[in-house]
Amino acid sequence: MAQQAPSANAIVVEGKSFALNRYNVSYRFHIDESTGDLRSDHFRGRVSGPIPNDPAPIINGWTGMPDRVRREFPDQGRGDFRVPAIRIRQSQGHTVSAFRYDSHAVVAGKPALPGLPATFGTEEVVTTLVVHLYDQYNEVAADLMYSVFEKYDAIVRSEYNRVLIPLAQPFITLAHHFTTESQGKAWGFSLVYTGSFAANVKKGSQGLTRVSMGVHPDQLSWPLALGGTLTSPECVSVYSKDGLGGMSRSLHRLYRNHPIKSKFATDNRPVLLNSWEGLYFDINQENMYRMAQESAALGVKLFVMDDGWFGDKYPRVSDAADITSLEVANSSEKLRFGIPEMVNPESSLYHEHPDWVLHAAITNILNSADISYVKWDHNRLSTTPSPAANLAYMLGMYRVFDTLTSRFPDILREGWASGGGRFDPGILQYFPQAWTSDDTDAVERIFIQMGTSLVYPASAMGAHISAVPDHQTGRTVPLTFRAHVAMMGGSFGLELDPLKMLPDEKAAVPGLIALAEKVNPVVLKGDMWRLNLPEESN
């Protein structure tokens, strides 16, 4: 008798075979009766009923059966010489593991991953298969969790191990050479994690391709005592028969709704002016208030100070101007104010309270004023003294994010870090939008935003009109062109000093803002179809 999940046969278990189904995709595997190993069978278009087993490999070389079959959870030390899913070093020093199927359960909903960002959903929208594995020689257990969302062609997998007695995008796509934007097969794999990661793709001797993604092994050495646990980041896997575009839209639909906890996930975003390229470090009360006045006069709804004010002992003092009393032109709204969540080590705050930097200081600042927006600007490389410290740092950072976003749910947050270094699914759990790149040249932004859209929805992208000549490339293009490119992002804004704009440009801005506000709901909630490649069109 088949055991079926409550969500429209999303997960079907028949004997020792498992099928995860959505509208256009099936993910299937089974238990090898002789070894207890999990063997992968299918990850492509949706199928029903029995499927033929892989032909038995012909053993005519140095490697045996484990190195020639599709293993769902490849461990180390039993004859599989491809990259393993996990490497556990026991206290005696050896690294051989022997995980076998133990049991399974199908549950409505999706269990949280302790300390890690992850997709989420209620019992009505997601179903999870939990497969329990056990290594009887080392007394180590592993739980594999496969979650299937009701409305999306995506499979989400994570791993949970327990001991009973151990600057790149985290995304890869595989596609046939003839796959196009709208036709052909494509697979996408997106890791929900912000730290160092490794992605491996290997085609073995039998013509089978294995993809593995996870925390980088050089940055993970996590001691587990008796009863200890380690939870891995989850990986979102999608399959598309409709080319790269179909793959992207599957990811977009999931990411717009299920990793982002912010209430602003698909809410209309206020048009903002960010002070960075307009003032850089020339922050003082007079400049800030003047720029805020000009922003409000243009119809800008949110003024963001992109630098810290650091107290009377240090330069760039700006804490007396009542910016939020300004009225936005052609609107009944007051101008809203945003700040960066960053601290200068050459500041009174840091010198007097270095222990406050990541937590208490930010809470105190956010409680001290009417702040509508915060950008988390992480511009320093994080080096750690040991592999264990890297994961510990990431878990601590996620805890800070979770605390602050839970404590201040009405503040819109944006992730910034030296040009998009923090743009990943883990960050989207806490920040509904991220700065796509420090390169604000409109022509180059077309390429950047298109590449970002392979994985992430336009709703999550920050895009601004910059000054010309552009500060990165020196290129000059018309204001309307710059604005239309910036409208492709969910968070539309300006990155310039209004005082330096030409009169005709200033006159055009209110109309461009009105157009941006009109198209913003479509950008936030609509499906993206990439009609032309930038390098093949004008």
Image (tube, helix red, strand yellow):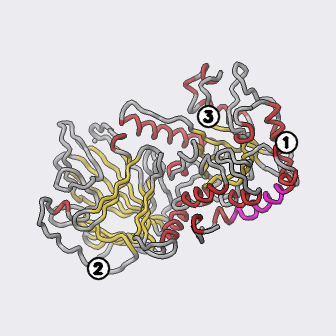
Query: Tag 1's secondary structure?
Result: helix
* Residue beneath disc 2: 50
Q: Residues within 10 Å of mark 1 (few under 14, many from 20)?
A: many
Of 3 and 186, which appears nearest the observer? 186
Quarter of the rendering occupied by the C terminus: bottom right
Image coordinates of residue 201 in percent, x first then y, are 34, 58
Q: Which residues are magenta?
A: 508-521
Residue at disc 2, secondary structure: loop
Query: Mark 1 belongs to which amino acid?
Result: Gln
Whether pointer 1 and pointer 3 mark residues with C-beta atoms closer than 8 Å, the reply is no
Q: Which residue is mark 3?
A: 342
Is the residue 235 above or below the residue 532 in the image? above
Cα–Cα gap, marks 3 and 2: 56 Å
Residue of label 1: 293
* Picture coordinates of residue 273, whole percent (x, y): 75, 46
Ranked by sequence position, the earlier of labels 1 and 3 is 1
Q: Position of residue 124 (x, y in %)?
A: 50, 66
Tell me what residue is drawn at x 23 percent, y 59 percent: 101
Residue closest to the far bottom = 49
Q: Residue at x 50, y 42 (%)?
A: 398
Earlier in the chain: of badge 3 and badge 2, it is 2
Query: Could you tell me if the residues under marks 1 and 2 are in contact, i.e. CB atoms within 8 Å?
Result: no
- Between disc 1 and disc 2, the foreground one is 1
Badge 3 marks a residue whose secondary structure is: loop
Instruction: Give the side of residue 349 with respect to residue 156, left or right.
Output: right
What whole-number distance in Å separates the C-alpha atoms at marks 1 and 3?
Answer: 25 Å
Distance between mark 1 and mark 2 Cα atoms: 68 Å
